Image: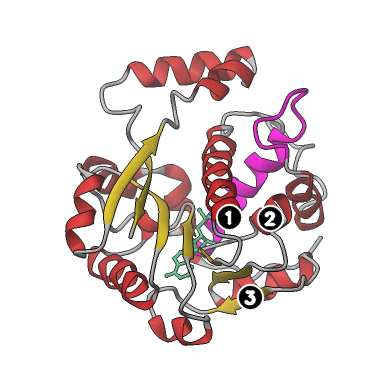
Amino acid sequence: MEETELRGVQQTLGPVLRAKALDNRLPDPILGDRHAEQVMRRLDPDYDRRRSGRSQVGLVAAVRAKAHDDWARAFLAEHPDAVVLHLGCGLDTRVQRIDPPATVDWFDLDYPDVVELRRRLLPPREHHTLIGSSVTDLTWLDSVPRGRPVLMIAEGLVPYLAEPDLRTLLTGIVDAFPTGRLQFETVPVWTRRSSKWDPTLRKYGARFHSGFDDPAALADWHPRMEYVDEVPMYDAPELMAKAPANVRRMYRLLNLVPGMKRSMRIVRFRF
Ligand SMILES: C[S@@+](CC[C@H](N)C(=O)[O-])C[C@H]1O[C@@H](n2cnc3c(N)ncnc32)[C@H](O)[C@@H]1O
């Protein structure tokens, strides 16, 4: 097993990676990420051999990743000269899944300890750079080429950032590039508040720090920023079509609880 020294919020990459690995074992996967399965096996060779080790209850993570991939592929098809900022990348293998052309420069950013682990687990690529930094220390932007369209993908990151830090990040990216897309998820205020009781987050000593009941209103933060759209997550058709029956039932029941369906929202903006 690979030794890992991850702390606090960094450990939240584990359950997401595991969910993506398990999705790949479905007869008809949602994301179909064989790299995730390989990385998960190296991190924890017995990950699927323990009790409930193969449970697909986290499958919604594959829906979220697929939504980001679909948006990213569409943007890169239109902008083959783009710069991609994949923030809070964890051990996600998006660059392998999307396999962008050599005209795209891709930056994967996470805390230095996560980036170090990534280096050990995933092979280097041309036109792919790892940045070990907190996303909130914007000096990392200095190492990124400007003057080209930018795609910012932040999957599973934004709720962990405090609102002022998020605002500085988004407006800083809009100011730094001529045009682009920003895609990420937000949670409503009640999810942020209740995150301090979330058993997984408590285990890692992490919690959400920002929440928005109307994510489209984030466009007000910058005159060039414009809300585009949102895609479903907990009630996504592919989740209902591909999840095993017991998991499908669980999500259907959860979605009956007021607010649950939109307890996390996948949104994008353009500028
Ligand atoms: C839930 S994981 C998601 C990982 C990956 N995006 C995925 O979907 O598999 C959250 C990630 O955000 C990273 N993160 C949280 N706060 C961060 C910060 N201030 N700067 C850089 N990375 C951060 C964590 O280290 C972790 O890898």
Q: In the rendered image, which residue does mark 2 sit on?
A: 93
Q: Are marks 3 and 1 in contact (CB under 8 Å)?
A: no
Q: Residues within 10 Å of mark 3 (few under 14, many from 20)?
A: some
Q: Which residues are magenta?
A: 10-32
Q: Are marks 3 and 2 in contact (CB under 8 Å)?
A: no
User: In the rendered structure, which amino acid carries the disc numbered 2?
Assistant: Thr
Establish whether ligand 1 lies closer than 8 Å to the Cβ of label 3.
no
Query: Residue at (73%, 49%) from the top-left corner?
Result: 36
Q: In the rendered image, which residue does mark 1 sit on?
A: 76
Task: Say above or below: 94 vs 164.
Answer: above
Q: Position of residue 257 (x, y in %)?
A: 31, 20
**SS for callout 3:** strand
Q: Is residue 206 visible?
A: no
User: In the rendered structure, which amino acid carries the disc numbered 1?
Assistant: Leu
In three-dimensional space, the C-alpha distance between marks 2 and 1, rounded to whole angstroms, equals 17 Å
Q: Is residue 174 visible?
A: yes
Q: Earlier in the sequence, mark 3 or mark 1?
A: 1
Q: Position of residue 196 (x, y in %)?
A: 32, 50
User: In the rendered structure, which amino acid carries the disc numbered 3?
Assistant: Leu
**SS for callout 1:** helix
